[in-house]
Image (cartoon, helix red, strand yellow):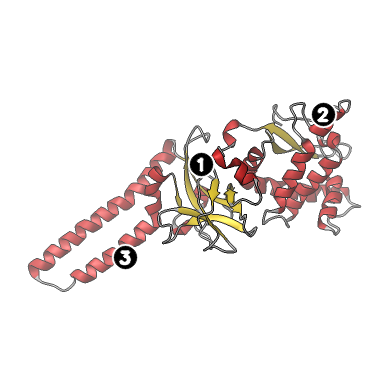
Amino acid sequence: MSDSAVHFSDSAASEQEVKGVKTGFDLLKALVFLQEKTLAWKESGRLDVQLLRGLCLLSQADPVKASQGFASWDLVESICKVRGRPWSDALDKARMSDDIRLQWNNLLKTWDTKSEGIAQLFADAQFGFLPLLQKTEGGGTGNPTLYRIDWVPAKPEMASPMLDQQEEISDPNSRAIRYVCEDIEEANPFARIFTRGFQLKGWRKQVYIVLLAAPLLFLWLLLVQIALGVTLSAAIGGKTVLTSLLSSAVIFWAVMASVGPMYRLGVDRIVIAPWWMQSVDEDRLLERRSPPRHSDKSIKAVRYVAKCPLCGGKVSATKGRLEFFGRIVGRCEEAPVEHAFSFDHITRNGKLLR
């Protein structure tokens, strides 16, 4: 458990129980906020996310006990309320402990993919603290494992500047949006290298340089081959020049389509990920990160999403197409042509482009 985590176990201080800490942190409001955000996840119907929602409900109902944690049977009962139907076995504590332990491990994996977006949402809402999933292992039937949500101070760099759009974005009737970064899920084996964040230091940096240099060397050798072929064809006569040029053009296009975005990362800092990392929606991006905004230098595959202020649909940062050629823009899944927004991965702000 982190030493900087905030606890709410002082039963004599009623104000602190409700507000969390004397600095004005509102525990109940933060729990409701977290629960509402989980409802927007596409995984909201899964048991591990329902476990998180159940933990939020228990913590709201008993803030004092929330500081110590809740046993498996408490969580099973809360999950049943969330689901609206029975789950696990309310008469078998061993079964409930096993089921909650399994779903807790699944939740930690899900939480890891959502942690950056959660941090940004809480920073935007100016809570000053971030949720942290914790548990205290039990020591037998008399001391069950307890699960809880701790609260740790948010780091200043987590909050991106909102510039002069703060009031506009907070207005539900505005046409501005606020993006949230999400990790990529269900990536293929090659894409997973970047979904976890490829650190640019040590041997990894050298491997990355070699991987970028190899296609350039290949294209240079291809250019030499084309020049030599044209020269020989002109000298001895032949009809293979056009075929060679077309074949070389196809090879050049295939190489650049596969690794071309990597070369622009150093200048643009964020690009559309190459085809072998993409999903059906083509909304996966490659972002080059570095201090002080991030802890180290790395390249990470991410998605940036927001809620459309016009129709409530999901906006994803993706290709600008011909109209916004060379740009990354936010497009609503309900009206991708008309509901188009600007995209800034530093401020995470966007404005309607129509």
Secondary structure beneath dot 2 equals helix
The percent position of residue 118, horizontal first and vertical second, equals 65, 43
Q: Quadrant of residue 336?
A: bottom right
Residue type at numbered disc 1? Ile
Circle 1 is placed at which residue position?
Answer: 346
Residue type at numbered disc 2? Gln
| Residue 243, numbered label | none
Secondary structure beneath dot 1 equals loop
User: In this orientation, does residue 140 appear?
Assistant: yes
- The reply to whether discs 2 and 3 touch (Cβ–Cβ < 8 Å) is no
Please name which of the two marks, 2 or 3, marks the residue nearer to the observer.
2
Circle 2 is placed at which residue position?
Answer: 16
Please name which of the two marks, 1 or 3, marks the residue nearer to the observer.
1
Packing grade of label 2 (10 A; few <14, some 14-19, many >=20) is many
On screen, residue 39 above or below 292: below
- The reply to whether discs 2 and 1 touch (Cβ–Cβ < 8 Å) is no
The percent position of residue 273, horizontal first and vertical second, equals 46, 54
Q: Earlier in the sequence, mark 2 or mark 3?
A: 2
User: Label 2 vs label 1: CA separation?
Assistant: 36 Å
User: Label 2 vs label 3: CA separation?
Assistant: 67 Å
Q: Is residue 37 left or right of residue 175?
A: right
Q: Is residue 280 left or right of residue 23?
A: left
